[in-house]
Image (cartoon, rainbow, N blue to C red):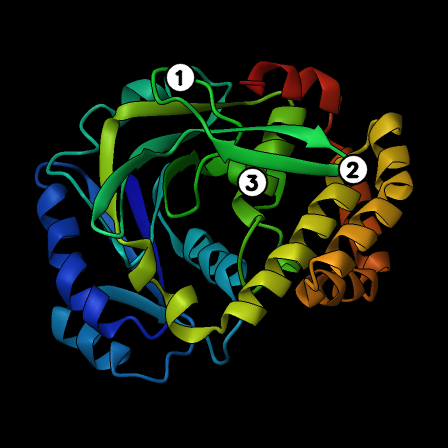
Amino acid sequence: MISIIIPNFNGKELLKKNLPKVFRSLDGIKSEVIVVDDCSTDDSINILRNMRVRFLRNNKNLGFSSTVNKGVLASRGDIIVLLNTDAWPEKNFLDNLSSSFRDKKVFAVGFLDKSIENGKTILRGRGVGKWQKGFLVHARGDIDKTNTLWASGGSSAYRKNTWIKLGGLDEIYNPFYWEDIDLSYRALKSGYEVKFDSKIVVYHEHAKGAIKSNYSEFDIRAIAYRNQFIFAWKNGTDLILQLNQFLFLPYHFTKALLNKDWTFFVGFLRALSIFPKIVKSSLKAQELFIKGDAEIIKDFKE
């Protein structure tokens, strides 16, 4: 059985537009759809009631990781599919999904994301990256390959029992960003595989999603910087990376100061304020690691 988990925050119009497309794409597939509402203040709950879809609701706004984790724990499927409210799948998009998980080492499969941006369609879904000056720098990769550094939290599938073993999305990243990269990276370092399948296609209108609709540009950038620090401090466990995280701080501070990028300093201070929590999360993750950072990243330099 496949469980479709859709997190929602103030997305009533997107629910009305995209949920029917999700249901139509699942004809003939044994599946369930669970919408987890992150304490929306719009009319999302009434929309969901009228659609007669299974839904859960947070008592307060928690963020992406907590909302998705709640849906996964309530699910009945062996395979979990994550879809954002601003995404909709092609018809029968999951027909070949089971074949992607025949190999027990496969933890996640990322989908081809036809991202609609400024009137153009950009093909996304496969991620690459490299460690540079203490940070993981990630980018869009070529879609003609089947490996990926991470499976996007807005359009991807996961093996549930491995998700549980890994601890799911780390809620330290709430409200959003880097949590999906973190989960995939931990899976890779724990010996699992993360794949990309260009035959599984979704359309994605990022500009209409909950983040840009509910947060200022300043807040979004500050949260992204904070979580970039969290990811580096938590997951960059090779000694050379730990040294670089310290040695390149003056460089990053100077660059941000010259560019008057105050969000960088806000992000750093926010990450620093929870440093003990980051260390605790890192030590827990390392209990499953069997590979180093250099071994993982060598396959994603493009």
Under circle 1, the secondary element is loop
- Residue labelled with disc 2: 134
Cα distance in 3D space between marks 1 and 3: 17 Å
Q: Nearer the viewer, residue 171 or 74?
A: 171
Task: Give, as a three-letter code, the residue at label 2.
Answer: Gly
Mark 1 and mark 2 lie on one chain; the one further toward the N terminus is 2
Q: Nearer the viewer, residue 62 or 249?
A: 249
Residue drawn at x 27%, y 57% is 86
Foreground label between 1 and 2: 2
Cα distance in 3D space between marks 1 and 2: 27 Å
Task: Give, as a three-letter code, the residue at label 1.
Answer: Thr
Picture coordinates of residue 124 (x, y %)?
A: 35, 35
Up the image or down, 150 lies above or below 302; here it is below
Whether residue 291 is visible: no
Residue drawn at x 67%, y 49% is 228
Q: Tell me if 227 is positioned left or right of 201 in this view.
A: right
Up the image or down, 193 lies above or below 242; here it is above
Residue 42 location, quadrant: bottom left
Mark 3 and mark 2 lie on one chain; the one further toward the N terminus is 2
The disc placed on residue 146 is: 1
How many residues crowd around disc 2 within 10 Å: few (fewer than 14), some, or many (20 or more)?
many
How many residues crowd around disc 1 within 10 Å: few (fewer than 14), some, or many (20 or more)?
some
Picture coordinates of residue 100 (x, y %)?
A: 34, 20
- Residue labelled with disc 3: 181
Picture coordinates of residue 60 (x, y %)?
A: 50, 80
Mark 1 and mark 3 lie on one chain; the one further toward the N terminus is 1
Picture coordinates of residue 227 (x, y %)?
A: 66, 54
Task: Give, as a three-letter code, the residue at label 3.
Answer: Ile
Residue drawn at x 29%, y 63% is 208
